[in-house]
Each structure stands twice: as structure tokens, then as C-alpha cells.
Amino acid sequence: MGLIAFLKDKFARKDQKVDKYHEGLTKSRKNFSSKLKKLSERYKTVNEDYFDELEQILIESDVGVSFALKTIEDVLNESKKERITDPQKINELLVDTMFVDYAKKGDIENDVVFNKEAPTVLLVVGVNGVGKTTTIAKLAYRYLKQNKKVLLVAADTFRAGAIEQLAVWAKRLKVEVVTGQAKSDPASVAYDGVKKAKEENIDLVIVDTAGRLQTKNNLMLELGKIKRVMAKEIEGAPHETFLVIDATTGQNGVVQAKAFKEVTDLTGIVITKMDGTSKGGIILAIRDELGIPVRFIGLGEKMDDLEEFDLDRYLYSLCVEK
Ligand SMILES: Nc1nc2c(ncn2[C@@H]2O[C@H](COP(=O)(O)OP(=O)(O)OP(=O)(O)O)[C@@H](O)[C@H]2O)c(=O)[nH]1
Ligand SMILES: [Mg+2]
């Protein structure tokens, strides 16, 4: 059974919740699967032009040029081998080829793994305005629902209003937040946060940081300091470092991820604003070029608009009209 048939079968079952993904990825689906369909309707059998157009559709959905070229080459070889010339079959082969590598890996656990002995510390980084603070609120909401004790730390002392923004979320979520003075050293706020977490048996500490352009060296180095002071208080902290990327920035997100990866150990990526982009292929580009797992995706501005990344749900939502 091809992958699309498998996914249709899987998500036809009522217990498989896919609605939020499907809705959030509407723009991406329209861009990708509708274009594939239109293309297959214009050709009776495939030829070189067909593959060129297919490649263009892939690139336009932001899977990254190298991933697009590699995929098309694989599809071309496979279609020759199997003597497939029917455009619709080629499209199915394309989807299979794009995803078979990832699908083979099986279900990957993206949830935060909690320490048993000490608080788990999660540091959230990224460039300006990508959705770090909102994602933190969403993550806090998620783990509060699982009865975890959560503490927020406002280590963005740089942007006016940032502390207040996190404090407003904290109030709404009914969790405590550790803050410092505006313009004070973010590392010292981070230190106060983990110290308090240790004293109060907190399960999860989420540390918000200022948006920083990957080209600003001093700000990038500041992340190292924040990490060092936290590790002094809790062994191995931060246990998770999530880079937040705005899906609407397209390939620039890959550039950001590469730069952050150079200066700090990232354990995961959160892709936000998937609901606002037609270029949902960015997830594949990130996975292909960086090898860092996409752990969560943001599908809106509300507290519950965060979903664990799940390959099957993603593929289904990108490729299948219900
Ligand atoms: N549609 C949509 N909007 C989002 C999502 N995540 C965040 N936003 C919006 O993006 C804007 C910026 O979000 P913030 O959380 O303040 O971003 P930030 O990275 O903390 O910004 P700085 O602290 O200034 O660097 C806000 O208007 C959010 O509501 C998402 O998944 N979907
Ligand atoms: Mg922020």
C-alpha cells in the first residue's frame, strides 16, 4: 500500500485526532497538493517537462533546493525502473519518496522527557518575534494539564515589555514567574529561576530569552553564559534547548538554525505560525539539512494551538484533502 493510502486508512478512524493539524496546514496543503493535482491533470504521460514542474512545486513549498533535487532524482529513477508514466502515479511516488525515509524511523517521541530527581530545565531561543514567548505559554499550558509543576523565567530583560508579556501569560496560566529588573543581566535571572525551582521541587522550568539575530555575536555568546550559570545550580541544565523558527520566514529559518546550532547545543526545534504559511515544506528542509528534530509546531496564537510534531499527521495534512 502506498503511503497516501496508508494515511487515509489510518486517519479515517475516529480515534485518530487530526483536525487541528489539517486545519492549521490548510494553506500549505492548498499550495502543495492542489498544485500536484492540477499538474497531473495537464499531462497524459510524464516527460522531462513534467519533472521540471514537479521540482518547481517542491521548491515553492520550501522543502529546500537540495532536498527537492534529491527527491526528484529518486522519483525519476524509480519511475524508469518501474516503468511508471501515469502522472497521478508519479505524484504518489513523489509523496512516498519524500517521506519514506522519515516514516521508516517509526513514531518518534517528541514530548519533553522529565528528570526524576531534579527540575527539568528548558531554554527557549530564537531570533526576534518568531513566537518564543507565546510558545512558552503554550508549553506551560500543555504540561500544567499533565499536572506538572511549572515555573516560568523571564530572562528577556532586553526588550521593553518582554517581562510584562510573560507575566501576563503566567497570570492567565496561574503559574509563578521569576523576573529581574529591566536591562539586568539575563544570566542572573536565569540563575534565580533554577535556584527557586530546585528549592520548590518544580518539575519544569521554562526560560524565556530575548530575540537575537544570529549575526550578533555578543548576543549569541550571552546564551553560553545563561547556560553555564544554570548548570551550576542543576546538573545538566538546560536539559532541553529549543530553537523557535517562524515558518513564514521560509528558507531563512534554515539559515537561523545553522547559526544557532554552531553556538549552542539545540535539542529540538519548534516551528511556529504554520497556520499562516503556505510553505509547510520547511519542516522537511529543517530535518533534511540539520538533523535536529522538530519537536512541536505552532498552529495559532492561542494557548492550545501547539501540537507535538507527528510525521503521519503532518503528511496527511499536507497531502490529503478530506
Ligand atoms: N498565527 C500564529 N501566530 C503566532 C504563533 N506563535 C506566535 N504567534 C504570534 O507571533 C507574535 C510574536 O510572538 P512572541 O511570542 O511575542 O514572539 P517572541 O519570539 O517572544 O518575540 P521577541 O521576544 O520580541 O523576540 C505574536 O503576535 C504571537 O501571537 C503561531 O503558531 N501562529
Ligand atoms: Mg519574547
Image: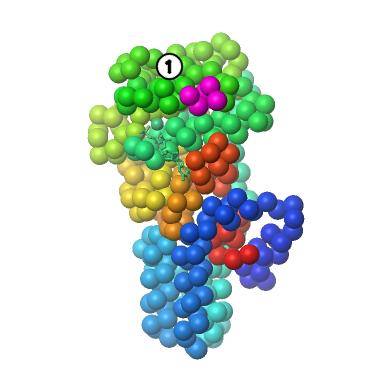
Q: Amino acid at mark 1?
A: Thr
Q: Nearer the viewer, residue 318 or 105?
A: 318
Q: Quadrant of residue 316?
A: bottom right
Q: In this image, 137 relative to 227: left or right?
A: right
Q: Nearer the viewer, residue 69 or 305?
A: 305
Q: Quadrant of residue 243?
A: top left
Q: Which residue is mark 1?
A: 179
Residue occupying image coordinates x 50% and y 82%:
41
Q: Is residue 170 magenta?
A: yes
Residue occupying image coordinates x 64% and y 25%:
148
Residue occupying image coordinates x 52% and y 47%:
299
Question: Residue 200: x, y in percent?
Answer: 58, 12
Q: Quadrant of the C terminus?
A: bottom right
Q: Is residue 82 above or below residue 192?
A: below
Q: Nearer the viewer, residue 187 or 320?
A: 320
Q: Is residue 47 magenta?
A: no
Q: Is residue 105 above or below residue 302?
A: below
Under 8 Å from ligand 2: the CB of mark 1?
no
Magenta region:
168-172
**Visible in this render: residue 201?**
yes
